Image: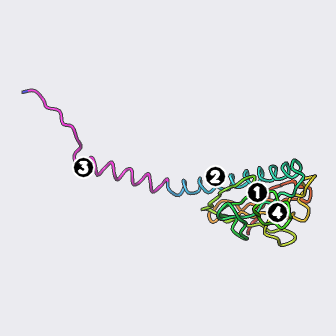
Amino acid sequence: MPYSTKNGFTLFELIVVITIIAIFATIALPHFNNLMAEREAKNVKATLLSMNHLARNNAALYHSNVVICPSVDQQQCLANSWNTGFILFIDTNKNRRVDANEKILHQEQLNLKYGDLNWRGTLRIPSLTFQAGYGLPNGSNGSFYYCSKTSVQHIRILLSKMGQIRFENPASC
């Protein structure tokens, strides 16, 4: 009598495979979260560096003040909401708010999950202004703080009076 082939798994084989997958997932999940937190921190650094350059260049190009401010809806400034994102716009009347005739140059949505982003400026203003002509952040120097909720190091992103950025890793936020 010829042998017949079976197409399927036994219950024991299925339980063994599911157990092995569960063990690998239990080991890998904490490392995956740490990897995602590190990636978020690197993205924040790169985004803020590129927004700094974009704001400086546009202030010099348009000969107008360019403001970076936190925003939830990507249309209006809202203080202390850097975690959700920010906008970059031309501020023709220098009031640090988006008005009907002012052009939004860039919208950045962040939605941070593994840390918090805050701005601490010298004048305690919740936005940054790059001055017309030279593109320098006069009166808007200060630091962004990315405070990690995981084991990833905290990041301090310092903005000088000349618009230069440097990074530090403080022990605490």
SS class, disc 1: strand
Label 1 and label 4: CA atoms lie apart by 9 Å
Specify start and end residues of the magenta stretch as a single range.
2-28
Residue sitting at x 37%, y 50%? 20
To which residue does mark 4 refer? 128
To which residue does mark 3 refer? 12
**Residue 158 quadrant:** bottom right
To which residue does mark 2 refer? 39
Residue type for callout 2: Arg
To which residue does mark 1 refer? 88
Label 2 packing within 10 angstroms: few (<14), some (14-19), many (20+): few
Point out the tag, 4 or 3, that comes first from the N-terminus. Answer: 3
> In the rendered view of the protein, which quadrant contains the N terminus?
top left
The question of residue 4 being in magenta is answered with: yes
SS class, disc 4: strand
Q: Residue 11: where, in percent of width, then height?
A: 23, 50
Judging depth in this view, the residue of 32 and 16 nearest the camera is: 32
> In the rendered view of the protein, which quadrant contains the C terminus?
bottom right
Point out the tag, 2 or 3, that comes first from the N-terminus. Answer: 3
